[in-house]
Amino acid sequence: MSLDEAATKPHDRLSAYLAEDLEAVNGLIRSRMASEHAPRIPEVTAHLVEAGGKRIRPMMTLAAARLCGYEGEAHQKLAATVEFIHTATLLHDDVVDESQKRRGRPTANLLWDNKSSVLVGDYLFARAFQLMVETGSITVLDILSNAAATIAEGEVLQLTAAQNVATTEAIYTQVIRGKTAALFEAATEVGGVISGVSEAQIRALAAYGDALGMSFQIVDDLLDWGGATGEMGKNTGDDFRERKLTLPVIRAIARADADERAFWLRTIEKGRQEDGDLEEAMALLRRHGTLEETRDEALRYAELAKQAMGVLPDHALKDMLTDLADYVVARVN
């Protein structure tokens, strides 16, 4: 199940409710990714920005601001800021991971080159900071600049932990909090800040974003293994082939006997993968129940996200954001 399947899905309802704001954000994105002197910049950026992404992160900024009664336009600049930060990290990630596909299309580094992807990513980070400064809020600048630093830190931590079977669950949690949850948290928190609501409500929005981001990434990692049931599909096992240590594998390694540990050392740490290894890895995850446990962990974070919304005012957007937390996990049913 994808987040794009039907108009009844929470993110589609959010998109419809926020249509006017989203149109303004898209206009800002198009104007700010332009470059008078370097046409390569809008070419590369447009390839990714207009590739049909769900815009979940900027929608969270818009929704948080509207939920808190904000009536200005600064939330639109912040939503564009969030999308630029996200897009910049994707451009850099695809270079680091040597990826060839993103959202079903060839990656920018494949179509152009690594240098273009890195430099255009840098340009988008710079544009993001220009936009957030225009809101005139030092608090907003503090939140988003901290998020940008945390994202980079999470990516470097992931790089150092990659293909190391000694990677712990605590390190995994720190990685995904950095690379995914940090921007979700900042996206919702700044929506509250520019609205001038109470500290308790701002903290609630931040807690919602953090928990939703954690659930979102855990579910993404679980879907790579075919979901909670481990059903094999055409994209199943990409993380295994790339020797990434995600929660189901980390927990299976922690419970492995000597033979199982030797298997993980050979396939993940040494990279010697053979025919049938993916099926064996899947069998080990099922044997130790780590797929279902991973879904339970995603559910736990989704519940934390929903609980955080309790102090916020009753509003149609509050219901949609609550439903979004449920739907993120429902993808793995």
Image: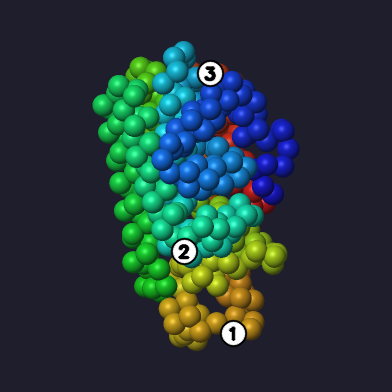
C-alpha distance separating marks 3 and 2: 43 Å
Q: Is residue 226 above or below residue 325?
A: below
- For mark 1, what is the residue? 274
C-alpha gap between disc 1 and disc 2: 21 Å
Task: Please indicate, yes or no, whether residue 159 appears anywhere in the rendered image.
Answer: yes
Does residue 215 appear left or right of residue 129 in this picture?
right
- Which mark is first along the chain, 2 or 1? 2
x 64%, y 76%: residue = 279
Q: Nearer the viewer, mark 3 or mark 1?
A: 1
Q: Position of residue 211 (x, y in %)?
A: 45, 42
Name which residue type carries label 3: Asp
Answer left or right for 243 relative to 280: left
Of tags 1 and 2, the one toward the viewer is 2
The disc placed on residue 97 is 2
Residue 215 visible to the viewer: no
* Above or below 231: residue 327: above
